[in-house]
Amino acid sequence: MAADKPDYKWVGTRTIRPDGHDKVTGRAKFGSDFTLSGMIHGRVLRSAHAHAVIKSIDTSAAEALPGVRAVITSKDFADQPSELAAAGEAMVNYKDMTRNVMAREKALYDGHAVAAVAATTVEIAEAALELIKVDYDVLPHVIDVDDAMQDGAPILDESLVPVGMDAKGPTNIAKRVEFTLGDAAKGFDAADVVLERSYKTAAVHQGYIEPHAVVSSVSEDGQAQIWCCTQGQFMVRTFTARLCGMPASSIRVTPSEIGGGFGGKTVVYLEPLATMLSKKAGKPVKMTMSREEVFRASGPTSAGSMTYKIGAKKDGTITAVEAEIRLLAGAFPGSPVQPACMCAVAPYDIENVHLVGYDVVVNRPKVAAYRAPGAPISAFGAESIIDELAKELGMDPLEIRAKNAAKDGTKAAYGPTFRNIGYEETVKQAQAHAHYTAPLGPNQGRGVASGFWFNIGGESSATVNINEDGTAVVVSGNPDIGGSRASLAMMAAEELGIDYSNVRPIIADTASVGYNFLTGGSRVTFATGLAVVEAARDAVRQLCERAAKIWEVDAEGVIWDDGHAKPASTNVGEFEPLSLASLAASASKTGGPICGHNAQNVQGAGPGFATHICDVEVDPETGCVTVLRYTAIQDVGRAIHPSYVEGQIQGGAAQGIGWALNEEYIYSDKGTLDNPGFLDYRIPVASDLPMIEAVMVEVPNDRHPYGVRGVGEVPIVPPMAAVANAIENATGVRMEALPMSPPRILAALDAARVKQAAE
Amino acid sequence: MQSVQFEAPGTVDEAVALLAGAAGDARILAGGTDLLVQLRAHMIDPSLIVDIKKIDETRSLTKNADGSYTIGAAYAGAEATERDDITKDWPGVVEGWDLIGSTQIQGRASLGGNLCNASPAGDSVPAMIAAGMTANIAGPNGRRTIPVEDVPVSPGKTSLAKGEFIVSFNLPARPKGGGDAYLRLIPRTEMDIAVVGCGVALVLDDSGTVTSAKVSLGAVSAKVLVVEDAAKAIIGTKLDNDAMAKLDAACQAAASPINDKRGTIEYRTKIAGVLARRAAKIAADRARSQ
Amino acid sequence: MAKHHVSVTLNGEPTEFLCSTRQTLLDVLRDELNLTGSKEGCASGDCGACSVMVDGRLVCSCLVMGAECDGKSVETIEGMADGEKLHPLQQTFLEEAALQCGICTPGVLVAAKALLERNNNPTETQVRYWLAGNLCRCTGYDKIVRAVMKTAAEMRGGA
């Protein structure tokens, strides 16, 4: 139940974001906007083969080209042992990371970096690439997850030993995971209806409009300064230090403004290359990826192949769910198959669940996190089969979800017991929403789907510095990908009791703030917000102590209210309130600078749930789908800045719609990427979408002072099934593979018409 | 990549001399929306780029006394859509032109560029062909005029000789009872290359019977097609269901598309028929509403 | 090869630059003139992040040659505000939260300004089709479209 909303001055209002003016005037500096004097330019040579042994690389001609200052290959990077590290919501392995950033034994995908050059101009660097001779032994390739699991499939890494299962010989299966709750076999026995279906999803890219970019400058004493667009400057420091064999303390990473990440900028690609080139050349090196390189060589998310089995009683109680989810990892292990399994049926209270997942390597770029990694894929299957189940039972699709809804006290298949969650609320609001009962016309249909994401906490550090004039600076270390710095400033202003316009948030580099886990996992407003609140409270404690000193009373006798120190009661004494500004002005006399600080590993992230409603119209002669109306209902905990929470919901929904309808990686039969550009990698454009109504349900997270839950990732989880369910409702045809592009829909419609004619 | 010279001549003769005298590959710059993409992708390596936009003839759109139009080869789509006259007379030609790319592309996209890029999927081409447009070509041997369908030969290749370029186009006066339309199928609502494009121009007499027609299909063959059987299927009819079915079938039969990242053979073939029917209907509605 | 000496009127000011034939107007703006407000998202005219006005026409600067701009007028995002006074679109975008990461925002603003100069009362559909060439991955376009229409209403002098 939503608690009564407290009367906040700033939290919950729609302030102007602090970085807004710079962003609407073009002043804000993004990754490739940065220059240093003496800067030279780096370019990467990439494999045009999907799978090949690299027999030799001859860089001598490139090195001799006038204007070339440095050339690097894997020889310049020490090999790394197999060792895991956290990168946002995924784990990465250093052995794989160094090979992904610069190929060693093999080129494992079209676009895999094999060498890099730094030269005085971009033209010279590109000419130098053409002079590098690489001797490849081209091998058969495999790019489909099911194909890669077959006996006889081309093997990417003979030494790969799968985790979680035994292998008979060399395999492409890197991991097997399993989650069990109850006894699925018994559950199916108890069911009146059992359905089994298979589903496939295509690999999609995060699609950030800003390509990767970095400037790295290594001085003669081995100190490195890196400017880059990233979701985690501390991650860049750690990974670059490791790969380049430098101490982390000698690398200072400053994050630029970031033009989109969605998980794709939680790892390094260019940063170690630019750093190594700079080290060798003795000059700052700038590197950017072209759009083509972004598609060929940075991580998309997995393609998936799944089978689902669901059993239910006539009254709609789901008695068992079984699923096998196979996700492709790209060239190195690490698909999000674990979270995919964990989230698949998390919105539901089901006694018997058995989920098995496989992480499979194929000759494609290594996948990176993409907004709720894995969950949209497994949800496509789960929410589609639940829809079919509802139809089979003659039940309303929201009714069946309400009936089986996870509530406080429900044990999730992946382990924890839910408490303080808002899923039921989202279903109820969907049922009550005008959208759900609006009339539909010919060739139109409506679908619903739900979704879940855990959200994370993690390490955050923040400092609140009180300036001499009574304004404040909030120093934290998370790149702002969605408006979080405004929320941080609002929470600090609320705590300090001063005007929001007097609180300046900055995003500091790795040398200027304590460690912060990267921006991802929907964690910043929650975890860094919590650290900021604690840091502000620390500053407030110090301000009260200063007032106590001035009044010559005990510190316990001073309270903070509305931006002023006040006596706790008349017993303490009759004192005029002291404003933050006056305490700040006298700070040097009362003990020195006032800085609040907090650093912690934040726990208690509240999970998020959503239910979406989608209306479509399908052209029966062309298979073209128009999304007519979209409503996204989500439990957001508490919306610190409602506009930016709505923005996360709308943006995630739009990405999900793109994933549903037209986005996919298209490969040639040589395993090379056919559509590495925005022309043929089709993200939604403005005319493709209707207004997206974001309905914010507030069930505050009681583990956060302002009730914050992560909101950024949940919204991408339901759309694919919501659209598929709407298409089924409009046409009677069930699409089991993504994307549901016009040729596929028309083929399915035609097949259904033929079948109908035969009957 | 060799260094590339850039010239912006003020007259046709200067341009012809520059093109004919070029050592290597010489390219025309009109709107640049294909040229610059190909240059950056290293798909071409010209020694010379000639910007023709300083030549008045390439940048004007004139309605002549007889109702026909002379359209500069480098005139931009955005400019054409702001002209009430050509938009009213030949809405199909204008909408084909207008569908090339985004608003930003429209600020530059030209009929000359779209035709000479010789993509089978060029949006402006089917309606140009259906309308009976001709191209005025200048070259070292003087001027010549040919039907626009004779310009593209195969993907990326035109029939123009070295030193030749298109200066302008002739668009006939809209006949009495005439109507035209261009439709394309794309997976999104904008920003895609046509999976299939269809241009139809027809003339209805007072009884509503089709007295002449031209049907052109894009993106279903190595070059944009003129489908004579499709025209025959509807001439002499009032576009009843039977005529439409024959039109559909003729277009499907004429289509010989490929499988590629934008469409399958099966899909393109079917859609050729669907678009032809829909475009013919729109053209007829426009013809009737005059 | 000698560079081209080009004279333009840039955001109302006479400006000169040198460029090679291969440099696009976007390259010139960013690398020669230090105006990094126009962004490179794709370099192929598919994303609109590089949108500018050339001779009063909305174009992708990545598809305009630096060398062909001699004598032309160029307007970029940097010229949209009037000193400290934001253009109504810029102001409304801030108030309506019509940006998240902000990388597409300069291109969207330049494009939206061009729309409102031609059509001061666009429908939602007209706004969406006009802006179809400006890709945004963060917002789902909802708040962008609302902000443009709200600005149009305000500029017309009523709500």
Image (cartoon, rainbow, N blue to C red):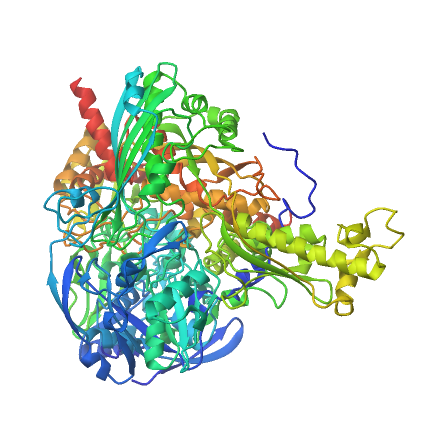
Quadrant in the picture for the N terminus of chain A: top right
* Closer to us: C57 or A670: A670
The answer to whether residue A711 is above or below residue A671 is: above
Left or right: where A120 falls relative to A712? left
Question: Is residue A594 visible in the rendered structure shown here?
Answer: yes
Quadrant in the picture for the C terminus of chain A: top left
At 37% from the left and 45% from the top, the residue drawn is A373
Residue C124 image offset from top left, x and y in percent: 49, 43
* Closer to us: C66 or A737: A737
**So how many labels did they put on this image?**
0
Quarter location, residue B117: bottom left
The answer to whether residue C79 is above or below residue A694 is: below
Furthest residue to the right?
A: A574
* Closer to us: C51 or A12: A12
Question: Is residue A622 visible in the rendered structure shown here?
Answer: no
Residue A54 image offset from top left, x and y in percent: 15, 66
Quarter location, residue A575: bottom right
The answer to whether residue B142 is above or below residue A565 is: below
The answer to whether residue A234 is above or below residue B236 is: below
* Closer to us: A116 or A295: A116
Residue A375 image offset from top left, x and y in percent: 37, 40
Furthest residue to the front?
A: A554
Residue A281 image offset from top left, x and y in percent: 33, 81
Left or right: where A657 falls relative to B27? right
